[in-house]
Amino acid sequence: MFDPEAELEKLSIPIHYLALHDVLAAWDAEHGKVYCSVGLNPIQKRCALTHELAHITLKHQRCAYADDSVTTIASITQERAAEMWAARKLISAVQLAAARESGLRPTAVARELGTTPRIFRARLLAEQHDEQRWLGADFVSF
């Protein structure tokens, strides 16, 4: 099982726990720290920290929702990329295939996989995106 806390520790990136408003976690590229909201359940914490690790890995410098800054298409694109990266790390292709065949509701599948429903939806989207890239643009117009 993917452990974002261990991965952040390997990168020597500290996690600071505090009361955050409107977000579960945030990457502060300027100070090289991850902030995580106190009181998250283990699944929320794992998903939020993996999302922030995605921002680090993808070399994103600003959070889309930081401060009172204007949310731009570029920042929304970064958020989507981070969410899809995190979803791929937290849910393997094999787990996704089994989940699709389970017949369970998405919230139940997410719980079984140890993720949030949002991460599960992002994994479905990531899979669709990967399939379209693999098949190529010509197939889409077929």
Image (cartoon, helix red, strand yellow):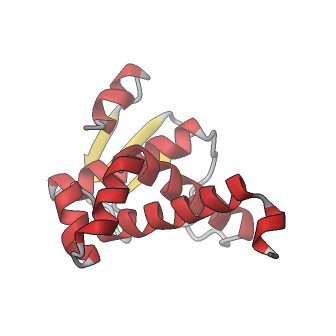
Residue, x 30% and y 67% (percent of image)? 101
**Residue drawn at x 25%, y 58% as measured from the top left:** 44
Which residue is more in the foreground, 123 or 74? 123
Can you tell which quarter of the image residue 8 is in? Answer: top left
98 or 105, which lies in front? Answer: 98
| In the image, residue 13 above or below residue 121 | above
Quarter placement of the N terminus: top left
**Viewport quadrant of the C terminus:** bottom right
Residue for point 24% across, 79% down:
105
Furthest residue toward bottom: 105
The mark tally for this picture is 0
- Residue 65 at least partly seen: yes
Answer above or below: position of 56 versus 80.
above
| Residue 97, x across and y down, in percent | 36, 58
> On the rendered structure, is 43 left or right of 14?
left
Q: Is residue 34 left or right of residue 113?
A: right
Residue 23: in sight, yes or no? no
Residue closer to the observer: 29 or 45: 45
- Which of 78/1 is in front? 1
Q: Residue 96's spot in the image, x, y percent?
A: 36, 57
Q: Residue furthest front?
A: 142
At which x and y percent is residue 121? 41, 70
Residue at x-position 27% and y-position 48%: 46
31 displayed left or right of 38: right
